[in-house]
Image (tube, helix red, strand yellow):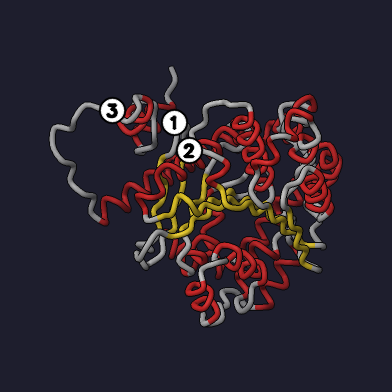
Amino acid sequence: MNTKPLIYRFFGYPTADNTELKRRRLGGKTDPPAAKPTPLTRQQSFSRDIGHAAAETFLLTRLTFKLLRYLGVGYRWMTRLLALACYAMLLMPGFLQVAYSYFFSSQVRRSIIYGDQPRNRLDLYLPTSSSGPKPVVVFVTGGAWIIGYKAWGSFLGLQLAEKEIIVACLDYRNFPQGTISDMVKDITEGISFVCNNIAGYGGDPNRIYLMGQSAGAHISACVLLEQAVKEAGGEKVSWSVSQIKAYFGLSGGYNLFSLVDHFHNRGLYRAIFLSIMEGIESFQRFSPEIRLKEPSVMGAASLLPPITLFHGTADYSIPADASKTFADALEGVGVRAKLILYEGKTHTDLFIQDPLRGGKDELFDNLVAVIHAGDKEALEKDGRSPPRRQLVPGLLLWLARQISPF
């Protein structure tokens, strides 16, 4: 007997027979409700969130044991797991403050369903001001294709919302719940949901930006290129690449052939990586840098939006050369590509330690400058913003940097 649907239903988790999912499958048509639903109280809303968390914990536990069977006994991933635990403890003062805002801020809409799969959810970070349509950033988190989760983007979402930018953080199936094609499918569907529904949340459907970090940068780049290929081939699509004003890739890898041995030496063993990527025969399909050289894809490149790649020169998880060679490949087929390198920055400095440090954040300022380009009033307001508050003491940040497994 398959007990999964019963467990999901008990915890309020989406199942195939949910009314919302039925509505989507039937093109938005459902039987009329017998009575207008009563709005959830704050206590009911919190109870619902607890139910979602419990269901996700159950799912995560089951998948963790499945993943451990793949990993087996290996000192590299074990030592990195221990380092990750210590790293998280050192940064806990900042994480707790962000978590409080994530769960209790009225500007955060958590776990909006965008598809049929259990991980097909997104979080929306909304500005306090409701004057006029806002620019939108669709963000895809990293996590080595294994531990990605939408809440990892909460600090970025909260910060950008303060600049009157809506942020949609997409969740997606991780390995071993899904492989790379499942991840690409999920993100494609999530972007479609945002493009077609964000106006209802105060977003501007003509000012949507796509951003990915680490593994999320790889997945979202695959999605963007695949969508361009479909459009160039005349396929019917639910969203258009033309709706994406720019793509931001942060610390990503775009050529699987050049990364497989590097990841193996870092603890993401070759056998697991091949399983995630559906075998070496799929490397070309899921390597945007390589696909750009295919004659059938080169024509689709003209549909791609401007692309900016960010990378730290001291990144040992994914070397900065990964962004350099991808930028060269993009420029080689006529795509407007820009590479911004941050001297001495590691894989986690740009996304975690620097924002927690407070004060000036060069990456964040670069993002906002691009998104607000052409909006003189917004740029002037950005220039008057007070320095960002420090959330973690400098000593803890330094220790976390030394012990970071990334």
Q: Which mark is residue 120?
A: 2
Q: What residue is shown at x 51% (from left), y 51% (from top)?
A: 169
The number of numbered badges drawn on the structure is: 3
Circles 2, 1 touching at the beta carbon (< 8 Å): yes
Q: What residue is shown at x 49% (from left), y 69% (from top)?
A: 163
Looking at the image, tell me whether mark 1 or mark 3 is earlier in sequence order. Answer: 3
Residue 341 is situated, as x and y percent measured from the top left of the image, at 78, 63
Between 390 and 367, the one lying in front of the other is 367
Q: Amino acid at mark 3?
A: Lys
Q: Quadrant of the C terminus?
A: bottom right
Disc 1: which residue = 116
Q: Decide if residue 210 is on the left or right side of residue 319.
A: left
In the image, residue 303 above or below residue 107: above
Residue 314 seen: yes
Circles 3, 2 touching at the beta carbon (< 8 Å): no
In the image, residue 212 above or below residue 192: below
Q: Quadrant of the N terminus?
A: top left
Q: Decide if residue 49 is on the left or right side of residue 256.
A: left
Q: Secondary structure at mark 1?
A: loop
Callout 2: 10 Å neighbours few (<14), some, many (20+)?
Answer: many
Callout 3: 10 Å neighbours few (<14), some, many (20+)?
Answer: few
Q: Decide if residue 3 is on the left or right side of residue 288.
A: left
Between 262 and 132, the one lying in front of the other is 132
Q: Secondary structure at mark 2?
A: loop
- Label 2, label 1: how many angstroms apart (C-alpha)? 7 Å
Looking at the image, tell me whether mark 3 or mark 2 is earlier in sequence order. Answer: 3
Between 16 and 84, the one lying in front of the other is 16
Disc 3: which residue = 29
Callout 1: 10 Å neighbours few (<14), some, many (20+)?
Answer: many
Residue 344 is situated, as x and y percent measured from the top left of the image, at 81, 68
Q: Secondary structure at mark 3?
A: loop
Q: What residue is shown at x 52% (from left), y 82% (from top)?
A: 384
